[in-house]
Amino acid sequence: MSQFSFSSTAEEVTAGVDLSGQTIVITGVNSGIGQESARVLGSRGAYIVGLARTADKANQALSALGVEGTGVACDLSEPATVRAAVESVRGLKRPLDVILCNAGIMALPERQEKHGLELQFLTNHMGHFLLVTGLLDQLTDAGRVVVVSSAAYRMAPEEGIVFDDLDGKKTYAGWRQYGQSKLANLLFAKELHRRFQGTGKMAVALHPGVIKTNLGRHDQAGVDKIFADMDPAAVKSIPQGAATQCLLAARPDVQNAGGQYWADCQPAEVKGPALDDGLAKKLWETSEALAAKL
């Protein structure tokens, strides 16, 4: 992948790739890098199963992009709608080549709790955990699960995942809890790939970059300050932000990327709790227990 870098776009990293006959599930298909991923992967021939909070939003997005696909309602913060989405996707009777876990929320300024969990952990991690585990048997023999994490995983608590405070009641800070949810994304992909060992399937996590999208709408003042303090050269466009996930979803020459963490279209190092295999296993087991209750 030496030819690709920070500035590469989703179109550039998928140039020459033929995805005809493949089916790709994408969450958050109606805006930002999810929308761009749907556009580019659809233009390469993939059938896009686009998930958004409502089927209308998903179908409108796919129609506007001019790609072949089906829109499915999926509110990641509502387990019942995630399970309904799983059944809708299964009902299409299409083997899945890729599940791209793209959607999320970020930096809620005040603690919000739903179903007994802090909303960012519920939406970013548990929603995708329910979706992916519900669809695992639909993956092809070389299927991929591509999970959008973030370099913000380093903002998680020192111990990584605070299992006795998943509702955030003891200590809440918007960016801290966002970091914990992004660490959970990373650890989920890590443990899922371990469980894929012996198969041709893979799971991989990535940092898309710092991009101006509506992800920061819950703390717009804080996000605006971050961008104001940043070197503009460090901010990606939406086509650049979608590049790493499209590369990992589409290119046949990255099938060995499973279990890794990528950024700027390259494998990247992780630090601290992100290296902890035991933490990844404990998160999986905790998530299974939560899923049974939700």
Image (tube, helix red, strand yellow):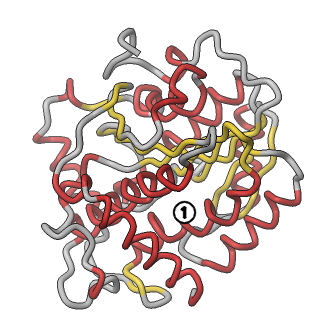
Q: Residue at x 28, y 66 (%)?
A: 180
Q: Residue at x 45, y 64 (%)?
A: 124
Q: Residue at x 31, y 22 (%)?
A: 6
Quarter of the image that includes the C terminus: bottom right
Helix, strand or loop status at disc 1: helix
Q: Quadrant of residue 121?
A: bottom left
Residue 281 in the image: x percent, y percent?
Answer: 39, 67
Q: Dot 1: within a 10 Å radius of its alpha carbon, few (fewer than 14), some, or many (20 or more) residues? A: many
Residue 92 falls left or right of residue 136 = right
Nearer to the camera, 223 or 251: 251
Residue 284 falls left or right of residue 200 = left
Amino acid type, callout 1: His
Q: Total marks drawn? A: 1
Residue 240 in the image: x percent, y percent?
Answer: 41, 26
Residue for badge 1:
128
Q: Quadrant of residue 42?
A: top right
Residue 186 in the image: x percent, y percent?
Answer: 37, 53
Q: Is 138 drawn above or below residue 267 in the view shown?
A: below
Nearer to the camera, 225 or 288: 288
Residue 143 falls left or right of residue 184 = right
Q: Is 219 drawn above or below residue 25 in the view shown?
A: below
Residue 253 in the image: x percent, y percent?
Answer: 54, 19
Q: Residue at x 44, y 90 (%)?
A: 116
Quarter of the image that includes the N terminus: top left
Query: Hey, which residue is sitting farthest front in the picture?
Result: 198
Q: Is 61 drawn above or below residue 291 in the view shown?
A: above
